[in-house]
Image: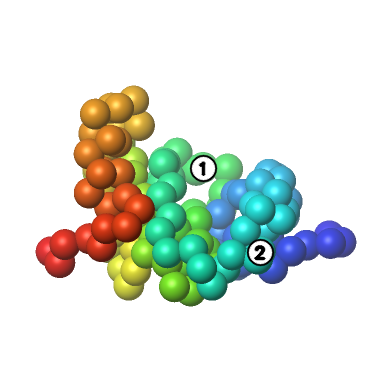
Amino acid sequence: MENLTPLCRLAYEYGTDKCPQMGHTYTPYYYQLFKDRRQTVRKVLEVGIGSPSTMKHVKGYKIGASLFMWREFFPKAQIYGVDILQETIFEADRIKTFLLNERDKPGLRRLVKEFGKGRKPDAQ
């Protein structure tokens, strides 16, 4: 494929379906939005982590694929993810995930209040 961005390549490397190589065209758009902010973004929240059962269209999908993509793309950012499925919850270097339904508006508000702009997460 021609004109693949660095983010497209990362998405493909980590096995997320957000890239043209896997059927979606999100990463070229995201790259245009964020390419000049890679060193300044400090926090990323992704709603919906995905699991092998929900990502059957991606061969060998590994939980948190796009979270790992974001971690590499934003080298100074803490990456957060939320999902409704317990099987998707994990922690890794600069990645923290939470069990939360995206329809739970009060829960999302609490999460943003605790980890949102200007606050550093408490050590746990």
Which one is nearer the viewer's eye here, 105 or 101? Answer: 105
Amino acid at the residue labelled 2 = Lys
The spot of residue 6 in percent (x, y) is 69, 68
Location of residue 110 (image quadrant): top left
As helix, strand or loop, the secondary structure at mark 1 comes to: loop
User: What distance separates the C-alpha of mark 2 from that of mark 1?
Assistant: 30 Å
As helix, strand or loop, the secondary structure at mark 2 comes to: helix
State left or right for residue 45 relative to residue 104.
Answer: right
State left or right for residue 86 relative to residue 59.
Answer: left
Residue lying at 50% horizontally and 43% vertically, measured from the top left: 55
Question: Looking at the picture, does residue 66 appear above or below residue 87?
Answer: below
Residue beneath label 2, please? 35
Query: Is the residue marked by circle 1 packed among few (<14), some (14-19), or many (20+) residues within 10 Å?
Result: few
Question: Looking at the picture, does residue 100 appear above or below residue 73?
Answer: above
Residue beneath label 1, please? 56
Q: Mark 2 or mark 1, which has the lower sequence index?
A: 2
State left or right for residue 40 relative to residue 90.
Answer: right
The spot of residue 106 in percent (x, y) is 24, 29
User: Looking at the rendering, in which quadrant would you find the N terminus?
Assistant: bottom right
Location of residue 95 (image quadrant): bottom left
Query: Is the residue marked by circle 2 packed among few (<14), some (14-19), or many (20+) residues within 10 Å?
Result: some
Number of numbered discs overlaid on the protein picture: 2
Location of residue 64 (image quadrant): bottom left
The spot of residue 75 in percent (x, y) is 48, 74
Amino acid at the residue labelled 1 = Lys
Please indicate, yes or no, whether residue 22 appears anywhere in the rendered image. Answer: no
Residue lying at 57% horizontally and 68% vertically, measured from the top left: 38
Residue lying at 27% horizontally and 52% vertically, measured from the top left: 115
Which one is nearer the viewer's eye here, 76 or 58? Answer: 76
